[in-house]
Amino acid sequence: AIRMTQSPSSFSASTGDRVTITCRASQGISSYLAWYQQKPGKAPKLLIYAASTLQSGVPSRFNGSGSGTDFTLTISCLQSEDFATYYCQQYYSYPRTFGQGTKVEIK
Amino acid sequence: EVQLVESGGGLVQPGGSLRLSCVASGFTFSTYSLSWVRQAPGKGLEWVTNIKQDGSEKNYVDSVKGRFTISRDNAKNSLYLQMNSLRAEDTAVYYCAKDHYGASDYWGLGTLVTVSS
């Protein structure tokens, strides 16, 4: 199975900050990568698929980039509603695997 | 509006069985692959299984192979997960999710499965 490793596992940030989360695959996955946001007690929400395609209705402050093994999710100007846990997921091969998650907390 | 509603979770003893259901609405059910994803309490997301539009292809994570079976009834807009030989480590919230170019764009609210004696 392809291992997905996110960094950092958690960090604190302030509203208005630019934040970046990294996801690394244990082998090349082309651009078959998605990013999700999850808030406590809620289902995950798709933010980005195909590494850089913004899902309909997702604010443009979210940006995804990368291909192969290294990917990033950038939030250009953190808003209060963005404090959550973020997961990457590869869908290049089965089993589809998620990263361990990155929790973004309020500083 | 797309909706996915899971049911069938509950408390079951180790070695027992449960059948989860997911009823969908708001989209053409028969034209999308569907997945089950689970989340153990306080843990991250784990993809469990998926099924193609016509049920011809099914994939599973190794930890559930031979114990879980995914199926669908396109006439009833329903997805199922038959879970046998349940273990404590299967305890989780189980989500059904609709496929979107390989990712999952709509998720249900989840149903909690607790495996404990």
Image (cartoon, rainbow, N blue to C red):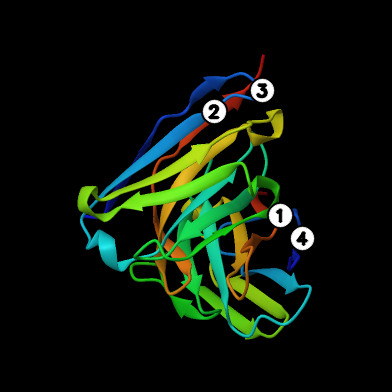
Q: Which mark is residue B14?
A: 3
Q: Which mark is residue B17?
A: 2
Residue B83: % across, % down: 54, 36
On the same chain: label 2 and label 3?
A: yes
Residue A61: % across, % down: 48, 72
Q: Is residue A72 above or below residue A57?
A: below
| Residue holding disc 1 | A100
Q: Amino acid at mark 3?
A: Pro
| Residue holding disc 4 | A8
Which chain is mark 2 on? B
Q: Mark 2: give few (<14), some (14-19) or many (20+) Cα within 10 Å.
A: some
Secondary structure of residue under mark 3: loop
Q: Amino acid at mark 1?
A: Gln
Q: Is residue B80 above or below residue A12?
A: above
Q: Mark 1: give few (<14), some (14-19) or many (20+) Cα within 10 Å.
A: many
Work out how far the residue at label 4 is from the one at label 1, CA to CA, in angstroms: 10 Å
For discs 2 and 1, the disc positioned in front in the rendered view: 2
Q: Amino acid at mark 2?
A: Ser
On the same chain: label 4 and label 2?
A: no
